[in-house]
Amino acid sequence: MTSTADKLRFEPTALPAALDTLRAEVRAFLKDALVGVPEVKRSHSWEAYDAEFSAKLGAKGWLGMTLPKQYGGHGRTALERYVVVEECLVAGAPTAFHWVADRQSGPLVVRYGTEEQKKEIVPAITAGKACFAIGMSEPNSGSDLASLRTRAERTATGWKVNGTKIWTSNAHRANYMIALFRTDPDPTKKHAGLSQFLIDLSKTKGITPRPIQNLAGGRNFNEVAFVDAELPPDALLGTEGQGWRQVTEELAFERSGPERYLSCFYLLRKLIDAVKETAAPATLARLGSQVAWAATLRTMSLSIAAKLNAGQDPALEASVVKDLGCQFEQALPGLAQELCELEPTLEGHGSDYQQVLGALVQVAPSFSLRGGTPEILRGIIAKGMGVR
């Protein structure tokens, strides 16, 4: 009989010593590529959009690393990709252009796309020249993704889509979107009536993204309207009615990476630099606790990378890392303000430290939403462990 503890395991994973060479190469590349990038811009990291930087990363062979060579990938391990992602986030590199494509859309296309799609799209992802958006959330659906209502109906020439998606990052400048639509209106088929679609945004009429300005003044989020949008037959990604299973698989990639605890890491580095010379023992203890928290999350995240590398399904463990990582990141701006006794400021005002703090104070509340709210994640964890 399987115990509750056996359902949730984080096996210790050590990065092979051979990856030290890769880490040194990435670190040297980033040192040169990020010369002159201001501190406050580095603090945005994975939300910062820079197509030119992504193309440079692709030219180094550091995008699509785990994708098959036969489709233009590099056939490398998930642990090698982990090193590249970790170094980019710690350095504050702008990764938003390629982020979704490299993390989750590429693996989905390889697994469920047609041969033509794989041959056309995967090389663009590995070159850092394909930006993807994720079409999941909808207005009035809250965190209940399975209640979505955007419809994809079969037609004589493919599919017709009507409805609205929201909080769709970079939809206004993405090349492609992988979206979840309802293909069966039967109310008894809440999950079974969902299917995924691969959409070429440059060729599809009837899709209108409307950027939404966030609290920090950024316009990455979008509301996306589909009005009689016509998709070709091969836009269906995978099997009709299997969208929920495919999305669950996709979310394991989305929830498990180092970005779940490194989004605010640049602020932690600035905090340590600001107080290390004069900190009292109590302050050092608070910092030590925060660093230990980050180290634990890294150990858990590395364990998931090893599971992905072995072809296992780490969906349950990924939900735990996402929930705990969100708690870590949302606590950090408050701690940083308390220990330095400095007020956060808007960009262009105050010290670099105050500007970095101000940027993250504004965006950190949104970390609860991306990849699933705490309530949804804890429900998944409880169900997966058999306690609900």
Image: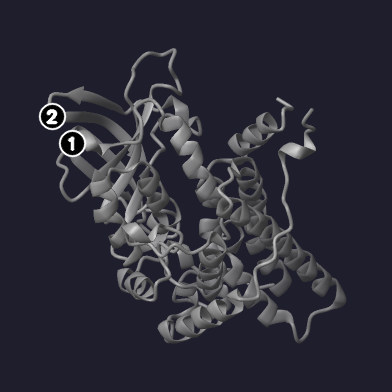
Identified by mark 2, the residue type is Thr
Left or right: 163 in relation to 278: left
Separation (CA) of disc 2 from disc 1 = 7 Å
Q: Is residue 168 visible?
A: no
Point 59% across, 45% down: residue: 312
Q: Position of residue 225 (x, y in %)?
A: 25, 38
Q: Which residue is mark 2?
A: 157
Q: Earlier in the sequence, mark 2 or mark 1?
A: 2
Instruction: Relative to 193, say whether 290 is above or below.
Output: below
Quarter of the image for the N terminus: give it. top right
Q: Residue 228 at what x, y percent from top left? A: 17, 31
Colour approach in the figure:
one colour
**Could you say which disc has been placed on residue 164 in the image?**
none
The residue carrying mark 1 is 232
Horizontal side of 268 relative to 214 (left or right) equals right
Q: What is the x, y in percent for residue 245?
A: 47, 32
Give the residue drawn at x 29%, y 61%: 123
Q: Are marks 2 and 1 in contact (CB under 8 Å)?
A: yes
Q: Residue at x 86, y 76 (%)?
A: 281
**282 up-or-down from 247: above or below:** below
Work out which residue is located at the far right of the displayed protein and give it.
281
**Front one among 312 and 106:** 312
Compared to 247, does 45 lie above or below? below
Q: Looking at the picture, how far across and down is residue 209, in whole percent?
A: 26, 46
| Amino acid type shown at disc 1 | Pro
Question: Image check: 196 left or right of 352?
Answer: left
Dot 2 falls on a residue whose secondary structure is: loop
Give the image quarter of residue 33.
bottom left
Quadrant containing the C terminus is top right
